[in-house]
Amino acid sequence: MNAAKHAIKFFSMRDGYRGLLIESFLYLAWARFLIALPFTKVAPSLGSPMEETPHEPGTADRNELKKISAALHMVSRHTLWSSKCLVRAIAGMKMLERRRIESTLYLGTAKDKNGEMIAHAWLRSGTFYLTGAEEMRKFTVVGKFAKSINHEGLEGWNDG
């Protein structure tokens, strides 16, 4: 599909979904910038290390989680930079944080068929996996970051 067809399709979408795609693009760009930094500088912004949010349905609307997941996957295929698993997971976490929705970002490692070490990242909110679910079972969790709604930096948000 050429650029003109993409533009026509984009502008024919409902405003709410178009906004979600723009938000996804911006957070994917931000996450791509973050992963270029030393991980020790980025890790504190990801939440509480080696903790998880509950594995039970949260207060988040499952349809909203599905829309965010779909937007991240769609937009990540069309960015000018590489938007692989860690970029998508960080972007998704930031989108959920903005909506005051808890999430856990997982980091895993495994060996590929050649015996080389590979890594993967995925994002979960409640029982729903927003990114990386298709590959996560192949990996051993070596790190996780819980972003709860009461996490530092979110107190004092106005609910009204």
Image (spheres, rainbow, N blue to C red):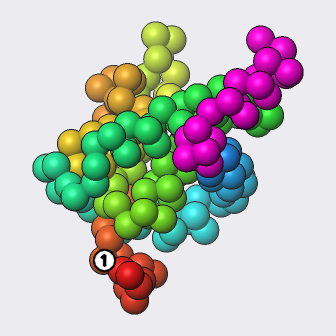
Q: Position of residue 66 (x, y in %)?
A: 38, 37
- In the displayed structure, would residue 44 be above or below residue 154? above
Q: Position of residue 149 (x, y in %)?
A: 32, 71
Amino acid type of the residue that numbered disc 1 sits on in the rendered structure: Asn
Q: Residue 9 in magenta? A: yes
Q: Residue 97 in magenta? A: no
Asked where in the image residue 17 lies, by quadrant, the reply is top right
Instruction: Check disc 1 and report the residue beneath it.
Output: 150
- Taking depth in this image into account, of 122 and 95 the one nearest to the observer is 95
- Taking depth in this image into account, of 123 and 156 the one nearest to the observer is 156
Q: Position of residue 113 (x, y in %)?
A: 46, 10
Tally the numbered discs.
1
Residue 95 seen in this snapshot:
yes
Residue at the far bottom: name it. 156
Q: Position of residue 152 (x, y in %)?
A: 40, 81
Q: Main secondary structure of the magenta part?
A: helix
Q: Is residue 113 left or right of residue 35?
A: left
Residue at the far left: name it. 56
Q: Is residue 111 left or right of residue 125?
A: right
Provide the secondary structure element on which disc 1 rests.
loop
Kindly identify the residue that appears in the image at 80 percent across and 34 percent down: 80
Look at the image and give the residue range highlighted in magenta: 1-20
